[in-house]
Image: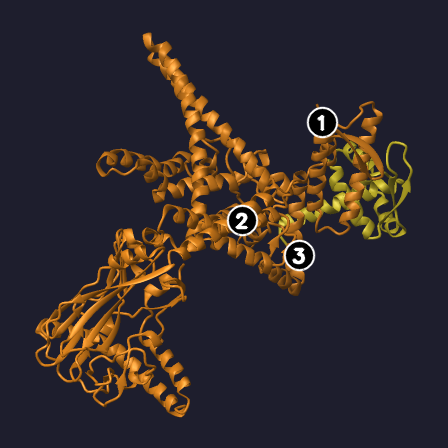
Amino acid sequence: MNIENTQSQMRKGILEFCILSVIRRGEAYPSDIVEEMRAANLQILEGTLYPLLTRLKNANMLTYRWVESNSGPPRKYFSLTEKAKRSTRSWSKPGTNFQTA
Amino acid sequence: MKKIININLSGRVIPIEDSAYEKLQAYIESLRRYFAHEEGRDEIINDIESRIAELMNEKIRGGVHAVTDEDVEEIIHTMGRVEDFEAADKEDETAEKASQQNTTGSNYAYTAKEKRRLYRDTNDKFLGGVCSGIASYTNIDPAVIRLLFVILTLATGLGILAYIVMWILLPPRDMEGYVGKRLYRNPDDKMIAGVAGGLAAYFDKNPTAIRFIFAAPFILNILFGVFSWPFDGHFLFPNFVFGSLTGTFILAYIVMWIVLPEANSEYEKMEMRGEKVDVNRIRQNVKEGMGTMKDRMKEWGEEVKESAQNIGSKAKEFASTRGQAFAGEFKESARRGGYGIGHAIGVLFKAFFMFIAAIIAFSLFVALIALLFGGVAWWPINNFLWTSNWQQFLAWATLVLFLVVPLIGFITWIIRRVIKAKSKNNYLGWTFGGLWALGWVAMILFVTSVIGDFRSYRDITEPVQVNQPANGKMIVAVSQPELEFTGRYGWMNDGGDGWDLSDDTMKFAAAKFNVKASADDQYHVNIKKYGFGKTEKEATNRAEKIKFDVVSKDSVLDVANGYAIDKSSKFRGQHVEVEIFVPVGKKVRFDQSVRRKLNSIHVKVKRSYRRDRVVGIEIDDSNENDFYYQTGVDYVMGIDGYLKDPSGTAVSSHSDNSEYRYNEGAAPQPKPAVNDSIQRLIDEENKKIEEAKKESERKIRELQEKAKQVKPTTRITKEVLKNNDAVAISPSPASSLVQWF
């Protein structure tokens, strides 16, 4: 395993972790996720967010529902699945501040 | 002024400016490519589209009546460009690949194998994606491969063939494409179109050096042309346009101008220099990058104009600044002159490119004709074919309108099919159809005109002064060397034996021999010359103009190695015959040189009952009409008017005696009483044919075996012999020429 590989895996992992952390606090709309992550000084583009969301959804970590919007087409609001909830529960143990991210 | 169109994005109708829409479309297309291998690609794209729709909707709500370029830019910025994703993603990819390699060996082997196969790249294509497929297979810049194909096509025509074959054979595939440095035209460093600049960037060389390579042969040629012009009297222009090196370089430049895209965006420029090539997956597809062939040609035309003006203004600038530097009282006039020069150069440049374009078109045209004719090599024959300018005109009109026009029409049709060009009116079809109809008319007129030249058939007889042989035997020989193509036209030297051609004379090594019984006890020889013509007079005239010499010396009748037709009488099936009258009981012998050096040409003329009206002509040199006599055999004139060989078999020029070839070689060959020089020649000739003879003897033996088996049916025997002869004697080229009409 080379260093680059590790880094990219870490980066991917961190991004996914952050996304899940944001959504864990409640249903979220992708642009809101971006906003929140930006606020935490984590630069992410919407364009890169969508594939990650789809990937997580396909991995049964996320689910979504359609919400009518008056500013355009219906919006997809993402929330965690039971499976994701179980696995993220451990994150919120004392000692990790990441969830604020 | 901008056009506003309504688009449907995720179920919302959004008014958008035309140019903004194109930007958006290109962006989504790039995303589609980027996510091509991602699972759930459509979903991702849909999500992104909805988000874009939402953002646009907000803009519209904000009060604008249509989404503008800037809005789209802004949206793309928030969503992120593919390039921006790329940096992170590249690492992901390598990681994935690495893990693949580590964990699943078989999987790796499969992908490796997949990669080694040759496909057509549907993502990056001009016509069928063959070149870009090869490019990604070999990891060479597609532009370079395309160039090679174009050069191959222009040079040999092989390129297009290979392309079409591969187009058919190779499976198409959406491919990753080529990764690496790309060859562009460099707009930042250009003299004419930036070709040299682009090449320099690609090969990391000094652009000036590359420019010099392009320009050197051209300049040298002009210099040489100017210096040599007064001396050799050659016209200057063809020298430097067709001068092989210059032509190649100019052509190469123009081809590259057309084929290579200009590196317009920052991204393309980086690609050109080979920087940051990882962001390669946004490729120009046909519409964005190269544009369709048609658009490119149009663009090219405009570019040519532009650069011509550009060069003009540069020269003007140059001239005026220099003019100021020289200053003084010449300042004003120099500037004016400079302007004039600049303008003149601009105009000259335009003219020059028009000229080049015309040359290219013309050479394509010539190539077509050359293909049709199997080479321009036949050119000098032109002098001998047409009896009038009108006929010549008709011949060319037939060639061009009847043969070339449909060919060009076909090519045009193919090209238009390939580029999917559609025109509302069918004027092209009408034009080609009309021209072809004219071609039919020309052909019919032409054929009638040529047939008219064969209406009359006349012969003239010229007696030859015969020196009566002392020992009662006349030997017919050809002492002149065998007629060979003199090679006056270097590119025609494979014309071979049996005929010759120069600007004013055409010679055929062909003559017919006819031996008859003499009415008295003297040998007599007549030369009969035959000619065709529109009228009897013309036919006679043509026959008279044939030059054919037969000289009697001691006991030898020395026949010329062929007959000559001069340019003024044209070639209309002229032929000659030697009539030999042998007294009864006297001998005649044909030397081998006759067989060797003269082919027989036989013309059968069918006449109608009306006097001298020719209704059908058949010219052939098949075996049956070939030389009837054996060489090296002493024939004796029988009392019945037929020649008899030593075994007593009668031979006549019109008999169907097919057996005579059997005895060749086996027949007795008494030593002839010929004078020394001829004998020496004969010996040489004998030696020459000795080897050929051995070969044919072997064949004859084989055939004799066969012949014995089928002896009862003489017809078959004849057939077999005919085949044998086809091997032994090459057909007379004269007749193949005649069949040419």
The CA span between labels 2 and 1 is 55 Å
Closer to us: mark 2 or mark 3?
2
Q: Which quarter of the rendered picture does the C terminus of chain B lie within?
A: bottom left
Tell me the residue that label 1 is attached to.
B70
**Residue, disc 2:** B436
- Say whether residue B29 is left or right of residue B451: right
Q: Earlier in the sequence, mark 2 or mark 1?
A: 1
3D distance between C-alphas at marks 3 and 1: 42 Å
Q: Is residue B423 above or below residue B647?
A: above
Q: Chain of mark 1?
A: B
State which quarter of the image contains the N terminus of chain B.
top right
Q: Is residue B282 left or right of residue B308?
A: right
Which residue occupies the extreme top position in the image? B329
- Examine the rendered structure and indicate whether residue B406 appears above or below residue B687: above
**Mark in the foreground, 3 or 1:** 1
Secondary structure beneath dot 2 equals helix
Q: Colour of chain B?
A: orange
Q: Position of residue B121 (x, y in %)?
A: 61, 52
Of marks 2 and 1, the one in the foreground: 2
Tell me whether the residue at label 3 lies in contact with that at label 1, contact meaning CB atoms closer than 8 angstroms: no
Which quadrant of the view contains residue B576?
bottom left
Residue at 28% of width from left, 62% of height from top?
Answer: B499
- Residue neighbourhood size for the residue with mark 1, other residues' Cα within 10 Å, grouped as few (<14), some (14–19), many (≥20): few
Identify residue type, mark 3. Ser
Where is mark 3, residue-wise? Answer: B99
Is B44 in front, or is B669? Answer: B669
The chain painted yellow is A
Q: Is residue B578 above or below residue B719?
A: above
Residue at x 50% of width, y 37% of height: B185
